[in-house]
Amino acid sequence: MHLTIEELASGGDGLAREESGRVVFVPGALPGEKVRAKLAQAKRDFGRAELLEVVEASPDRVRPVCPLFGECGGCQLQHLEYAAQVEAKAAWVRRALSRLGDLPPLVKVPSPKAWEWRHRVRLSVGRQGLGFLAAASRRVVPVEVCPVAAPEVNRLLPGLAQGLAKMDTRHVSYLEILAGEKRSLATVGLDRGRSLSNRWRGELRRLCRSAGAAATRLEQGGAVEPWERTPETGVDYWQEDGLTLSAYPNEFVQANFGANRELIRLVLGAAASAPEGGVLELYSGGGNFTLPLAKQGRAVLAVEGDPESHASAKVLAQREGLSGQVELRQAEVAGTAAELADQGRGFALALLDPPRTGAKEVMPSLAALAPHRIIYISCHPAALARDAAMLLQAGYAMHSLAVVDMFPHTGHTEAVLVLDRA
């Protein structure tokens, strides 16, 4: 079948339409291209096709840097010129939010680095070796050099791959690297319910150390080893205005340190122009926004459900002398927001950075709390649109909108929507 690609769908697939009007997704095809494709999946409302040939190429098509592109499932857009990627991601956000009404001017923030940006990498371990999963598969594609990974990550990969090849890795599910300028740390995921000897665990630690990891943390069945959080056991990712933020192994931190710094600056700018008063931060993680806001002079009540991230935020607040500016609660977010609303608490500013599924269950309580300004950070534009619609119905108006390319060459992006109480 011959198709003309109309646009790049959210996620990175080319989107075309058959004569019948049915939408067809074509991975690897770009807007404006004429392609020859083979229908691989046919549903009533949509289809998926395999790209066979690009008959007329887009001027934005480039040669992928990675020889594994198309086989490895880590990247979807290496064949699209980087500036065009940023434009495409802005279009995804604009399209997802368009039903909300007139949008504010959209600010586009590219990643400071289009390559070598990824400081946190999780790799799968399988019979094929150490690498990333193939697209739509559980097959491991071995990787010894990844062009989107930071140099500090790539320095570890060959040694890790060679060492694992000599070990019995049937009980290892993943290996995560957290890398910074001063040190790199490893987390190794082990099968749930396996009784593994201390000798075997020691061999695993020695393997990671010989590959270049300063220390290794083991995780088994969701339980992680205790970790002493000191300046020497973490990786620094923010150092501005006399404040240092550190990340620790097996805890969430944005993988793109450079783009995350741009994201923090966006949040601080939006907070600086908000009315004075306290801040409620939901899904606060390890203090990524909490502590810069506190450094700005704000009193912050930060709520996070994950005990490991909460512990890191507490340690960092003490280390940086900001404990008096922050109240850190380790609690379920939706329930805590409801309790605060019932108590009649007031906040000048609310900030939330929920997981990909969004924060639908929090919206009624957030509307009842009625902060003057809300900053909503989202990695899923459709979930953001759904939740923002509830806030607009509650009397808020959109103030500003930005797209931060946190994930170059992938089908993901980050949006920042600021809403003010009308």
Image (tube, helix red, strand yellow):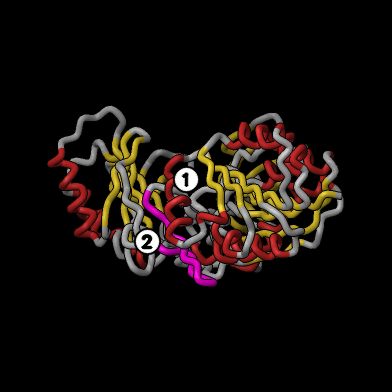
**Magenta-drawn segment:** 235-249
Ranked by sequence position, the earlier of labels 2 and 1 is 2
Q: Which mark is residue 310?
A: 1
Secondary element at tag 2: strand
Please state which amino acid type lies under the numbered disc 2: Ala
Residue 394 is marked as none
Say if residue 226 shows up in the picture. yes
How far apart are the two marked residues, 2 and 1, measured between alpha carbons? 21 Å
Give the left or right position of residue 353, taking residue 320 as reference.
right
User: Could you tell me if residue 386 is visible in this image?
Assistant: no
Q: To which residue does mark 2 refer?
A: 179
Seen at 68% across and 65% down, the residue is 269
**Circle 2: is it few (<14), some (14-19), or many (20+) Cα within 10 Å?**
many
Q: Is residue 184 above or below residue 191?
A: below
Q: Is residue 124 left or right of residue 270?
A: left
Residue 71 spot, x, y in % from top left: 44, 51
